[in-house]
Image: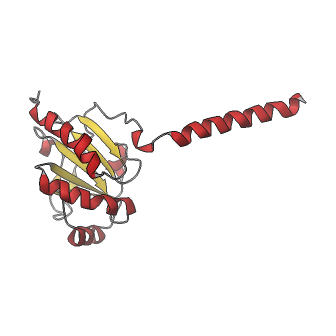
Amino acid sequence: MLRYLVPLVLFIALLIFLGIGLKLDPRTVPSPLVGKPAPGFELPRLHALDRSVTPDDFKGKVWVLNVWASWCASCRVEHPVLNRWAQSDHVLLVGLNYKDQTPDALLWLQQLGNPYAVSLVDADGRVGIDWGVYGVPETFVIDKRGTIRYKHIGPVSMEDVERTLRPLIRRLQEEEPA
């Protein structure tokens, strides 16, 4: 009898953990990078591949890094929100085009609008890995000192912009850089 009881107890414990896991919101996965300096990179601009950008180019400014790709269905859902947000606020929105083909990315922005001040090419995904990207889209808020202050997993909604991103960015813009 004990021989059957142990597997049954293990199975029930597994079901309990599965049930708990299914109730968690995957967008609330804590990032170990929040509160730490943004990882360095030097990437080409999507619209000018011969010119590169580093995080140092944004020092002294609050900026938002949005990881996107033309092959990403959720990015298509998020894109109108980013367009509207970029038009309504003076937010420094930087795109990180993740594991994408440059012609596809350029066509995407031409057809759907370009909310980004600059979009960078991460063709092999190494920078995304350094930033702890689980999948696209993901959005990071970086303060004037170059510290990651917030990470949003999944598509950004206007509710996210209104309730979280806009107030955080305003607060960070009022802070003095160290």
Front residue of this view, candidates 84 and 100: 84
Which residue is rendered at x = 28% and y = 31% of the image? 36
Vertical order, 156 against 46 (above or below): above
Which residue is rendered at x = 27% and y = 60% of the image? 79
Front residue of this view, candidates 156 and 40: 156
Residue 40 shows up from this direction: no
Front residue of this view, candidates 93 and 99: 93
The percent position of residue 148, horizontal first and vertical second, equals: 25, 36
Which residue is rendered at x = 23% and y = 72% of the image? 111
Where, by quadrant of the figure, is residue 48 drawn? bottom left
The percent position of residue 101, horizontal first and vertical second, equals: 32, 67
Residue that lies at the very extreme toward the right in this rendered image: 1
Q: How many marks?
A: 0
Which residue is rendered at x = 35% and y = 50% of the image? 126
The percent position of residue 168, horizontal first and vertical second, equals: 20, 37
The percent position of residue 89, horizontal first and vertical second, equals: 12, 50
Classify the position of the C terminus by image quarter. Answer: top left
Residue 99 shows up from this direction: yes
Vertical order, 164 against 66 (above or below): above
Classify the position of the N terminus by image quarter. Answer: top right
